[in-house]
Image: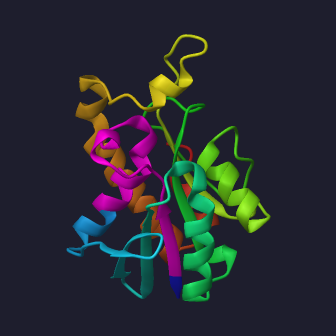
Amino acid sequence: MKYLIVGLGNIGQEYWGTRHNIGFRVVNELVDAAGMTFVEERYGAVARMRVKNAELVVLKPNTYMNLSGNAVRYRLQKESLPLQQLLVVVDDLSLPFGSLRLKPKGSHGGHNGLRNIEEVLGTSEYARLRFGIGNDFPRGRQLDYVLEKFSEEELSKMPERVKQAVEMIHGFCLSGIEVTMNLFNHK
């Protein structure tokens, strides 16, 4: 079985390490742990890897966050994959830092990357792995917050949280979304 795993983020050195780029951080770890590398292709950097009997096509869109839908649609069509084999890894303000939630579908919740994917695909019926980035910012400062770097305290906890996110991606591909949700969402 083949899956498309999409990590959302913004390209460019100025965005590396920001809260909004946690999707890139997670898929980088997924690919690095498998000893694979990304190659620049149309609409983004792509890595191909296997996890046991599952083939993973891992995408980091180069369209910037707000236009992620074009990259996702293109790669789904190019790989001839149905929506059930798509998983989007995304930052989430409504979850405390490091909380991980796998969901089979859902609203964009104000996230511009998810909003664009929903608009382009015409549906919100695709799985997403939400990585909590917290919401410790003053009213009206959301944009500044998501584009800030993580704190030292958050960075100290990052490797363990990213490792668990990678385990959840493996679970999604090998055991299915329901089993993986039952194993991890309560933690």
Q: Which quadrant of the structure image shows residue 14?
A: top left
User: Which one is in front, 131 or 172?
Assistant: 131
Task: Say left or right for 185 vs 109.
Answer: left
Residue 34 appears in view = yes
49 vs 176: above or below: below
Q: Residue 120 magenta-drawn? A: no
User: Which one is in front, 119 or 168?
Assistant: 119
Task: Say left or right for 54 vs 92.
Answer: left
Q: For the view shown, which residue lies furthest in the right direction?
A: 122
Please report the residue visible at 56 percent of the width from the left and 65 percent of the height from the top: 87
Q: How many marks?
A: 0
Q: Which quadrant of the structure image shows residue 22?
A: top left
Please report the residue visible at 63 percent of the width from the left and 73 percent of the height from the top: 73
92 vs 96: above or below: below
Q: For the view shown, which residue lies furthest in the left direction?
A: 35
Q: Residue 15 magenta-drawn? A: yes
User: Which one is in front, 170 or 25?
Assistant: 25
Picture colour scheme: rainbow
Segment colored magenta: 3-29
Please report the residue visible at 29 percent of the width from the left and 59 percent of the height from the top: 29
Residue 129 position in % (x across, y down): 54, 54
185 vs 32: above or below: above
Residue 104 appears in view = no
Residue 8 position in % (x across, y down): 48, 54
Q: Which quadrant of the structure image shows residue 37?
A: bottom left
Residue 107 position in % (x across, y down): 75, 47
Please report the residue visible at 67 percent of the width from the left and 54 percent of the height from the top: 116
142 vs 167: above or below: above
Residue 12 position in % (x across, y down): 33, 49
